[in-house]
Amino acid sequence: MGDGSIKDNGDYGKAIIQYLEGRGISWIWWVYDPQWTPGMIESWKTFKLTDCGKFFEKAAKGEIDK
C-alpha cells in the first residue's frame, strides 16, 4: 500500500466511517487529491477513481453495509 491505494475490501473505509459516525462526526471524501493518501482519484487529468475512491463513492450513496 505504499502507493496510497487501498484495495476494495472495505476494511479501512468501514473502520474510518464507523469511527467518525460513532463520535457524531460527519464525513465526506476528505482527500480529493491524487497526491494525498488514501487518494480518491488517480490524476487531475482523468479524475478516474481509485479503489478507495470507488468504495467511498458507494458509501456516500449508502450502497455499503457499515
Image: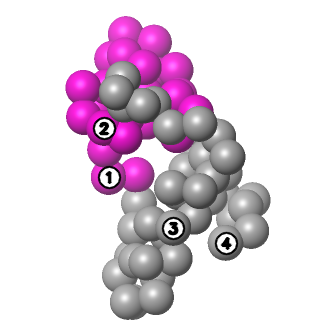
Which residue corresponds to mark 4?
66
Q: Name the amino acid, label 4.
A: Lys
Task: Tell me if I can see residue 60 in this picture.
Answer: no
Q: Secondary structure at mark 4?
A: loop
- Mark 2, other Cα within 10 Å: few <14 / some 14–19 / many ≥20: some
Return the mark for residue 30: 1
For marks 3 and 1, give the one nearer the viewer: 3
Answer yes or no: is residue 36 visible. Answer: yes
Does 50 appear in magenta? yes
Q: Which mark is residue 15?
A: 3
Which comes sooner in the sequence, label 4 or label 2?
Answer: 2
Q: Are marks 3 and 1 in contact (CB under 8 Å)?
A: no
Q: Position of residue 49 (x, y in %)?
A: 53, 28
Task: Quadrant for residue 34, please give it.
Answer: top left
Quarter of the view holding residue 28: bottom left
- Amino acid type at circle 1 is Trp
Q: CA distance from mark 2 to mark 3?
A: 16 Å
* Mark with earlier residue (2, 3): 3
Label number found at residue 37: 2
- Mark 4 or 3: in front is 3
Query: Over which residues does the magenta segment extend?
Result: 29-52
Q: Tell me, yes or no, whether the highlighted magenta stretch contains residue 57.
A: no
Quadrant into which the N terminus falls = top left
Query: In the visual, does 37 lie left or right of 50?
Result: left
Identify the residue at horizontal 51%, vertical 67% (top origin): 15
Predominant secondary structure, magenta span:
loop
Of the two numbered discs 2 and 1 on the same chain, state the one appearing first in sequence: 1
- Work out whether mark 4 precedes mark 3 in sequence or the reverse, and give the earlier one: 3
